Structure formats: C-alpha cells, structure tokens
Amino acid sequence: MKTFIFATGVFNILFGILVQSGFGVATTLPEASPGMVTHLFGAAAAFFGVILVLSSRDLERRGALVAWEGVLRLVGFIVMTYYALYAGYGIRPLLLGATDGVIGLAYLYFLPRYLGVSLRELLIDKRSSQPGGIFR
C-alpha cells in the first residue's frame, strides 16, 4: 500500500507539472479564463502529490490525509464525467476522471484494511485503541 500511495503521489506531482507547462494535458480541462483553472488545477495536483509522497512514509499517522485524497479523487471523477458527457469535452476528461475514480476507490477500500481500522475511523482520524490498529 505504501508503494502504491507513493507512486500515485509522484504521478500527481508529474501531472501537476505537465498541466502547468501546457504539454497538451491542459486541453482536457474546462476553461474559466485563460489558464486560470488549468494553472490552479496543476498546482493543486502537484501539492497533493507531495502530501501523498510524505504520507506514504508513515501511513499509520498520516492515513487520514490519504483517505481524504480518495474522497477528492471521487469528486474529481464526478466532475470530469460531467464535463465529458454533458458539456461536450470529449473522451479525455472521462478517461482522466475514471482513473481518479479507480484510485479514489482503491484508497478508500484498501487503506482501512491495510491499517486495521474502519473507513469512518480513518476519515475522522480517530486513534484506535485496538492492538494492531492505527497509532500502535
């Protein structure tokens, strides 16, 4: 699980840099004003990537951050699917959204099992008093 979270964090960092630099990735995002949404999204992706990389080093203490990133990815899936299907942005945002959806579900399904806590406990960052649970 640590390796998966680390790898997806690195992906976020690289994707954020690509979006910022405009290497064709930006064309999948809706435009509010020239470059504003694209640059903001790219910066956020890069910073979330840093959070994931750092969190992967100590999931027992930072797992809640990863769980909330999973929720954010599911929201991203919903938003990108809407733009793909109803706003006429084509297949690229649908593919990006589907990727976010799969990663988000993986975080929310596998991370609690890996840490030995419930998803609810993870999302509210509740410390488990059970042996083998979070914050041993």
Image (spheres, grey):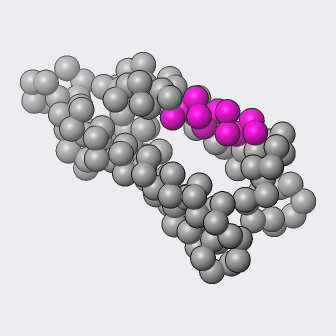
Specify the farthest residue to the left: 131
Does the rendering let one see residue 72?
A: no
Task: Judge whether 85 appears above or below 7 on screen.
Answer: below
Task: Judge whether 40 appears above or below 52 on screen.
Answer: below
Task: Judge whether 34 appears above or below 81 on screen.
Answer: above
The quadrant the C terminus occupies is: top left
User: 54 and 10: which one is in front?
Assistant: 10
User: 74 and 86: which one is in front?
Assistant: 86
The quadrant the N terminus occupies is: top left
Q: Position of residue 83 (x, y in %)?
A: 64, 71
Q: Where is residue 40 in the image (x, y as percent from the top left)?
A: 75, 49
Q: Which residue is drawn at 20% across and 44% down?
A: 118
Specify the farthest residue to the bottom: 86
Q: Quadrant of residue 48?
A: top right
Q: Residue at x 80, y 49 (%)?
A: 24
Specify the farthest residue to the right: 34
Task: Judge whether 15 appears above or below 1 on screen.
Answer: below
Q: Residue 108 vs residue 21: left or right?
A: left
Q: Residue 130 vs residue 104: left or right?
A: left
- Is 60 magenta? The answer is no
Total count of labels: 0
User: 133 and 87: which one is in front?
Assistant: 87
Q: Residue at x 25, y 49 (%)?
A: 120
Q: Position of residue 37 (x, y in %)?
A: 77, 57
Q: Where is residue 42 in the image (x, y as percent from the top left)?
A: 72, 44
Q: What secondary structure is the magenta-colored segment mainly?
A: helix
Q: In which quarter of the image is residue 84?
A: bottom right
Q: Residue 100 vs residue 23: left or right?
A: left
Look at the image and give the residue range highlighted in magenta. Answer: 8-18
Q: Which residue is drawn at 58% across and 64% down?
A: 94
